[in-house]
Image (cartoon, rainbow, N blue to C red):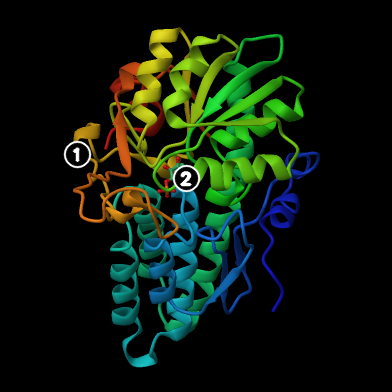
């Protein structure tokens, strides 16, 4: 079976051909072959590029939980393909039961990124209309591919929207956190897509990339992606961010999101909230870039977002090497919530929400 290539699929859609041309879509992290899903093992980057081949929803769920694939949109896309695989394996006499079980296992993999639950809900709605297993198999594959393709298209659209609110004429620097690039999405990236677009249009001076302790998405993934694509990047320790902003060449902090609530609060990688506080102090603008699949209008505010806590060894060790006493207590929340009041702009494929709040969010996404 041939590989599903979202960039080619995007280019084949009327009206979006130019979007896929002249853009650095970046490294692919998710490959779909119709009967198997391949994921680039992000735990091994930047040292090794190794692909894992998966044939079941249970395997996909393990890969999400263990961070083989990570980043909110990439998690949602992978879960959708996981359901397509589950349909292929489902037993004829109890396929609805088997698919419900697969969905339950995928939903239990990680709690914070709402894209996972959004994708599973979209799949469930499609399944409601499937009269038999053969139809379900075809429709779930179609839907997973559509989710993948639409995510890439959303990233390209968001980059254009974002640049329209960045008023600076001369090239300027930006600071980003975590990894929001091609590795975290269907391609191109959310915040990193905006950064790619700035670079493509000659408006980017430099990207400062927080290393993003403890999992080091910034140093292991963002610095790797940007270096490969020839985009000027300087890596800094998270604790250096205030000093970077104090120097004056950074005009925007640009980050992604894992869940955005009805009042405009944003859950994203731990350390995002401190950056928003720092940005406000230094008069630097703060932008959140995420597809509408990251918006959760069912939650009124960030207080209700489930924040994942991961094992203490992620903080005590780096790649098995001890950094701290083996028994020391660790608090390892891997996301935090930035209050809407610290955010200058939320960018989705639907457009830009400046000074986000409940009214502006409801105007774009409707009341729940
Ligand atoms: O724990 P991770 O690596 O899945 O966290 C990823 C982030 O927090 C990203 O900033 C977010 O998912 C946006 S990715 C486009």
Mark 1 residue crowding within 10 angstroms, few (<14) / some (14–19) / many (20+): few
What is the quadrant of residue 231 in the picture? top right
How far across and down, in percent of the image, does residue 147 sit?
52, 55
Q: Is residue 188 above or below residue 119?
A: above
Q: Can I make out residue 345 in this image?
A: no
Question: Which label number is shown at residue 216?
Answer: 2
Say which of 68 and 169 sits in front: 68
For the image shown, how many numbered marks are present on the structure?
2
How far across and down, in percent of the image, does residue 220 sit?
55, 47
In the image: residue 162, left or right of residue 288? right
How far across and down, in percent of the image, does residue 294 sit?
40, 42
Say which of 30 and 125 sits in front: 30
Kindly state the secondary structure of the residue where label 2 is placed: loop
How far across and down, in percent of the image, does residue 88 sit?
48, 82
What is the quadrant of residue 64 in the picture? bottom left
What is the quadrant of residue 168 in the picture? top right
Q: Is residue 187 above or below residue 55?
A: above
Q: Can I make out residue 64 in this image?
A: yes
Task: Report if the CB atoms under discs 2 and 1 are less than 8 Å apart.
Answer: no
Question: Which label number is shown at residue 304?
Answer: 1
Give the residue furthest to the right: 22
Ligand 1, seen in the image, is in the quarter at top left
Kindly state the secondary structure of the residue where label 1 is placed: helix
């Amino acid at each position: 079976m041939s590989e599903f290539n979202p960039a080619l699929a995007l280019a084949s859609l009327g009206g979006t051909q130019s979007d896929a041309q002249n853009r650095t879509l970046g490294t692919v992290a998710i490959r779909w072959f119709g009967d198997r899903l391949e994921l680039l093992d992000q735990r091994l980057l930047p040292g090794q590029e190794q692909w894992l081949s998966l044939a079941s929803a249970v395997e996909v769920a393990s890969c999400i939980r263990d961070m083989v694939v990570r980043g909110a949109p990439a998690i949602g896309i992978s879960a959708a393909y996981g359901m397509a695989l589950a349909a292929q394996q489902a037993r004829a006499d109890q396929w609805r039961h088997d698919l419900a079980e697969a969905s339950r296992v995928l939903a239990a993999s990680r709690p914070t990124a709402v894209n996972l639950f959004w994708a599973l809900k979209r799949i469930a709605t499609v399944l409601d209309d499937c009269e038999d297993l053969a139809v379900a198999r075809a429709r779930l594959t179609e839907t997973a591919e559509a989710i993948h393709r639409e995510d890439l298209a959303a990233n390209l659209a968001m980059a254009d929207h974002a640049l329209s609110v960045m008023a600076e004429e001369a090239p300027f620097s930006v600071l980003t956190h975590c990894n929001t690039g091609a590795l975290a999405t269907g391609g191109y990236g959310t915040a990193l897509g905006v950064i790619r677009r700035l670079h493509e249009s000659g408006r980017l001076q430099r990207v400062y990339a927080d290393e993003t302790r403890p999992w080091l998405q910034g140093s292991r993934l963002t610095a790797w992606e940007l270096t490969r694509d020839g985009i000027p990047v300087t890596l800094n320790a998270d604790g250096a961010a205030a000093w970077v902003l104090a120097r004056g060449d950074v005009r925007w902090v640009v980050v992604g999101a894992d869940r955005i609530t009805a009042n405009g609060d944003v859950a994203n990688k731990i350390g995002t909230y401190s950056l928003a506080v720092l940005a406000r102090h230094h008069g630097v603008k703060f932008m959140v870039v995420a597809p509408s699949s990251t918006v959760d209008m069912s939650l009124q505010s960030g207080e209700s977002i489930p924040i994942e806590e991961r094992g203490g060894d992620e903080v005590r060790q780096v790649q098995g090497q001890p950094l701290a006493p083996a028994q020391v207590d660790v608090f390892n929340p891997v996301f935090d919530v930035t209050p809407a009041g610290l955010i200058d702009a939320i960018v989705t494929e639907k457009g830009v929400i400046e000074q986000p709040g409940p009214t502006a969010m409801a105007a774009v996404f409707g009341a729940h």
